[in-house]
Image: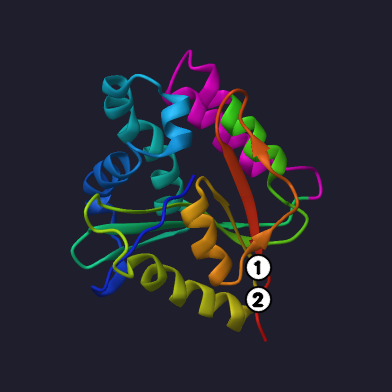
């Protein structure tokens, strides 16, 4: 799930000691996200469970990938390297299971994990961006582009594709400007909003 992040401060790699602060940032940033609102319709419960739910992505990125943040921790982007899997989307299956475990009894969390896992291309290695956010009141200031540009430049140097799922039209437009295109598959949540899986080929 994604929102458009924005900002002008410096970009750096997060450290594990900042894990809880980043988790709270992500939880607050996604309070108004349409997909999260569908998964957790009750606002009070959504606010309580968000740090745990998105902590699954955060812990995976801190362990297996990396987390880029602005100097003031007002925006963050989580990245996971994904290896091509001949036998199916094993990494996404594992991540989906952890997401379901973060919200026990919530079938919608399970559905999101299953549907996004099925839509995730796994035939080529790539960098996966599961989450990018800015704090409320810090959006539309250039933070999203500032967080994404260095990694996309790295993708171009390494010849590595990038992948994400956009959860709203505004963030989808930002990603398109940065070279992402629709995979041709749309994730329609039952009775809920739409998500757009997007892929970016490295540029020469």
Residue at the extreme right: 86
Task: Tell which circle, 1 or 2, labels the residue nearer the N-terminal end.
Answer: 1
- Residue 130 at x, y percent in the picture: 50, 50
**By what rule are the colours in the image chosen?**
rainbow
Q: What kind of secondary structure does the magenta stretch mostly adopt?
A: helix
Name the residue at 74% across, 60% down.
124
With 17 as the anchor, is 147 left or right in this view?
A: right
Mark 2 burial class by Cα count in 10 Å: few <14, some 14-19, many 20+: some
Q: Are marks 1 and 2 in contact (CB under 8 Å)?
A: yes
Say above or below: 133 vs 29: below
| Nearer to us in this view, 37 or 159 | 37
With 123 as the anchor, is 135 left or right in this view?
A: left
Label number found at residue 161: 1
Counting every numbered tag in the picture gives 2
Name the residue at 66% across, 38% down.
187
- Residue 126 at x, y percent in the picture: 64, 62
**Which secondary structure lies at badge 1?**
loop
Residue at the extreme left: 72
| Nearer to us in this view, 80 or 170 | 170
- Residue 174 at x, y percent in the picture: 49, 64
Say above or below: 2 vs 176: above
Q: Which residue is mark 2?
A: 202
**Which secondary structure lies at badge 2?**
loop
With 69 as the anchor, is 174 left or right in this view?
A: right
Q: Assign the C terminus to one quadrant of the image.
A: bottom right
Residue at the extreme bottom: 204
- Residue 101 at x, y percent in the picture: 47, 23
Q: Which region is colored magenta?
A: 86-110
Task: Work out how far the residue at label 1 is from the one at label 2, CA to CA, in angstroms.
Answer: 5 Å
């Amino acid at each position: 799930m994604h929102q458009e992040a924005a900002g002008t401060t410096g970009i750096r790699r997060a450290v594990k000691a900042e894990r809880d602060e980043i988790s709270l940032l992500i939880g607050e940033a996604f309070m108004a996200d349409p997909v999260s609102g569908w998964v957790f319709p009750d606002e009070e419960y959504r606010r309580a469970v968000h740090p745990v739910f998105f902590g699954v992505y955060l812990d995976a990125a801190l362990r297996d990938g990396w987390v880029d943040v602005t100097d003031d921790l007002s925006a963050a982007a989580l990245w996971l390297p994904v290896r091509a899997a001949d036998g199916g989307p094993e990494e996404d299956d594992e991540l989906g299971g952890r997401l379901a475990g973060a919200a026990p009894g919530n079938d919608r969390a399970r559905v999101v994990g299953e549907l996004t896992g099925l839509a995730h291309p796994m035939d080529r290695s790539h960098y996966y961006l599961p989450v990018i956010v800015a704090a409320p009141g810090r959006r539309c200031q250039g933070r999203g582009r500032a967080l994404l540009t260095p990694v996309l430049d790295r993708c171009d140097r390494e010849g590595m594709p990038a992948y994400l799922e956009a959860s709203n039209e505004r963030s989808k437009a930002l990603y398109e400007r940065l070279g992402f295109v629709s995979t041709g598959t749309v994730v329609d949540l039952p009775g809920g909003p739409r998500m757009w899986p997007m892929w970016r080929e490295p540029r020469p």
